[in-house]
Every structure is written in structure tokens, then in C-alpha cells.
Image: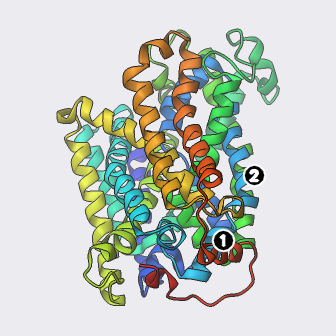
Amino acid sequence: MAVLDWLVIAAYFVVMVLIGVYAKSKISDASDFYVAGGKLPAWLVGISHHMSGYSAAVFVGYAALAYTTGFAVYVWWALSITVACSIGAWLFAPRWPRLRQRLGIISPLEYLAKRFNVPTEQLLAWSGAALKVFDVAAKWVASAILLQVFAGLPIAWGILVVGGVTMVYSTIGGIWADVLTDLGQFVIQLVAAIAMLAIVMVKLGGVSSLWTMWDQLPEGHALPFNGDLTVWFFLAYCVISTLSYNGGTWNLAMRMIATENGAAARRSMIFSGVLYLIWPLVLFVPMWAAPLFLPDLADPEQSYALLAQQLLPAGLIGLVLAGMFSHTMAMTASDANAISSVVVRDIIPALRRDRGFLPERRELFMARLTTFLFITLSMGIALTADSFGGVLGLLIAWFGALVGPIAVPMLLGLLPAFRRSGSAAAITSWAVGLAVFALNKYVLAGPIDALGTASAQSITVAAPVLCSIIVFIGYGFILPAHSAEVDELVDSLGSDTPAAPTSAAAAAR
């Protein structure tokens, strides 16, 4: 990289830290730290939800898929999330801020103590929080690899730089810092991606290249489904994305909780869905065109980085790099915020003798401390990733398996249709989903692989979450749980009728 590129990167980091310092002035208690007191505007939450939804994997793993399979990567990834946002805008998103209004929650798992019981809340809190640290560690490593490819910076230094900057602004600024840096990162990515798109189109002969380049690309690259990205794989990811992007991934639930009311949450989810429908087309065009500039590439994962180095002038390379790992910083900062809220509002109260929440000032201190400790621990794991070997990969895989089973009771528990599915249904569905994943991965791996790569991927991805859904719903019909308190809570989430925050969440403990 040229000196100008380094200056761009340095300026980017400085701006992120300054945003964190500015955001600190907006925080007076834990509610402000975690959910901005429900004051985040819908448009800002929509951008933040979008930015928090994907990481540097887009420019590495997805770039490789775009290089080898073409348009199908957009259908599989972006359209599945658009479907998820469309469903969530009506079913799930409006219910999250209403939980804050009714129960005063500032953690996405906090309501589970009232909806099911404390053991269910603790099971989901501990299992998700313990493994999430390894998922975030993998993201630090991915960002550091990008810095190494572009700038020759050792991976350890890359982890310390990216993780350190994220730690500063997220620890002092909470969710306000997260969403404001998401906005800044979106603007940076907007400029960088449009510059990349424009240069690629000029090199290929103008705007007409958007539809003429497909004739020059390998056969099948213009198809909506190609290679391992089959229609069944797409449908499987529609299910998983619906659970993940509507709150199964905790940091995205936090975005919805932070909106003013259900109507605002719905608008923000629709806005995020529109961004997923349109913006990936801008990002993917250079990736789709990469075989024309870099034919027969040995490692397709390097295609976007190599293309940027080949086509962009000094300064823009730094901007593109900032845009690439800004996604990871956005995800990890919001992950840290969500995990911290679960620790402070779900785990710590359960360990206290009186089962109550911490005093207000101490709660804010613990919010910052747990955010700092979570990022520190994840960076430590990332720095020693080589020593973990297969263990790190194993734990990350198991976290992926837990996302669906954890999300099923969290999200379906919000809906009136499943009010009869109680704590036993939630715990059993979690256990069955995890068991099915383990069965597929360690017992039936051979027979599943024999079905072919595409079918094997669909089964491995979809089976655990589908089994969790079936068990959760079926349990409610076969052994229904009846609770007037649950009925009242679920019914109250159907509209934005004003209701003052109560201490019901604490009382439920």
C-alpha cells in the first residue's frame, strides 16, 4: 500500500474512536448503553441492522463463490436475507421494542424468564455466550488476514489494531457508538464500492457491460442457481436467515429493541431488507467480473483483494480495505454489546443471592467492563488461534449449530400461535437441534456426503433448525402449557398501545 492508503486507514480508525467519545455523552445508564433508551431512529437502525449482518467474509468467502458460481451467490445470500427481513418486518421486529415497553428489557434473552422460566433463560444465555467468543475470535482473524494481504501487516498486529479500536469505541460508547460507526462505515463502503464498480465498468466497456459480460464468463454464471448453490440450499438459508436476522443473532435483536416502538422497528427492518436487495448487486459486480481480469485464479478467495490492488489508485485501495474490514468491526462491536447485555441482565442476576438486577451505577460499570472483557478474551483466542488447531474450528461449528436451536424458542415464543409451547418445549427443541447437528456431523457424515455436496450442505444446514421448529411446535400441541401470565404477555405484543415500563421482568425471577 502507498503512504496515502495508510493515511486513509489511520484517519478511519481515528474517526471511529472519536465517534465513541461523542457517543459517551449520550449514556447515563445501562439502558442507554445497550438499547439507547429506545431512542434510535428507524433509518439509522435499518442501516445498522444491515451493516451488522455480514463481515469480511463477503469479500473473501462470498467473493470466491461469485468467482466460481456467478449470480447464484446473490440469490442464495442477499435474496434469502431480503426474504427474512420481509417476514420479520411483520412478524418479529415490532414485538422487540414492545417487550422493552412492557417489561423494561434491555437484553434479548431477558424476557425468556417470564415467557418460559429462569432455567430456560439461563440455558440459552450460557450456551450462546460461551461459544460466541470463539465466533468473534474467528472474525478478528479474518480481518487480520485482509490487512496482511493488502499491507503485509503480521496477523497478530492486525488483530490488535482492529480489535483494539473496536474495543475503545464500543466500550465507552455502547450501542450509540455501534450504530454511529455503522453509519460511518456504510458511507465509507458506499464510496469505495461505487468507485470499484465504476472502474470495472469502464474497463469492460461501459454500463452495457452489466448485461454483456455474462456471455464472456464461464457457463452457468448467469443462472440463479449454480453448482452447490441449489434451490434447496437457498430455501434452507431462507429459514435460517429468518431466524438469525430477526433476533436469533442477538445483536440484531438489540437493534430492534432500541427503536421507539413497533412501527419504527418495522420501518427499520423494511429499510434493511431493501438494502439487502439492492446494495449487494453493487458489491458483487466486480466479484462476478473478476474471472475476466484474473482468469484461472488458484485461490478465488483472493479475487476481490487482488482485483482492488490491480485496478484502484493509491488512496482508494485504503478506502476499499477500510470498507472491507469495517463490516467485521461492525459485527464484532454489536456482538460485544449484545453478549454484555446477556451477561449483565441475564447471567449475573441469576447468580446474585436476591436474584435482582445490579444497582443503576454499578450496572453501567459492569456493562462497560463486560464489553471490554469479552473483546479482550476474543482477541486473546484469536492471537492464539494456531494453538487451538481443530478445537477452534470445532467450537465455531458448534456455535453455528446452536444459532438455530437458540433462536427457535426466542422468536417463536413471541408469537400467539405458539403460546402453548412452554419451557419444556423450549429446552427439548434446543437439545434436539443440537443432537441432530451432532448426529449429522459425527455419525451420519458418510451417508450424507454420499448424497453429493449440494444435498449434503442443505441437510447439514437445515436439519437441526427444522427439527427444533418441529419439536417446539409439536410439543405445544401434544403437551400444551397453560399460563395466564404468558397469554397476557404474548397478547400485549400485538400492538403499539402505550404501556409504561414495569419491573415485571425482575419480579418473574
Residue 107 image point, x, y percent: 47, 70
- In the image, residue 23 sits, relative to residue 200, either above or below, namely below
Q: In the rendered view, does 2 fall on the left or right side of 433?
A: left
Q: Is residue 500 left or right of residue 400?
A: right
Q: Position of residue 239 (x, y in %)?
A: 64, 41
Residue 17 makes an appearance in the image = no
* Residue in the image at 26% along x and 79% along y: 352
Q: Which residue is mark 2?
A: 86
Which residue is painted at 57% across and 62% down in the image? 183
Note whether residue 100 is visible.
yes
Q: Quadrant of the N terminus?
A: top left
Alpha-carbon neighbours of circle 1 within 10 Å: few (<14), some, or many (≥20)? many
Amino acid tagged 1: Val
Q: CA distance from mark 1 to mark 2?
A: 21 Å
Q: Quadrant of residue 166?
A: bottom left
Q: Residue furthest left?
A: 387
Residue for badge 1: 490
Residue 400 lies in what quarter of the image?
Answer: top left
Residue 348 at x, y percent in the picture? 30, 73
Q: Nearer the viewer, mark 1 or mark 2?
A: 1
User: What colour scheme has been applied to the protein in the rendered image?
Assistant: rainbow
Residue at left offset 44%, top offset 51%: 8
Q: Residues within 10 Å of mark 2 (few under 14, many from 20)?
A: some
Q: Secondary structure at mark 2?
A: helix
Residue 23: x and y in percent read: 46, 77
| Residue 505 numbered tag | none
* Residue in the picture at 39% in, 60% down: 125
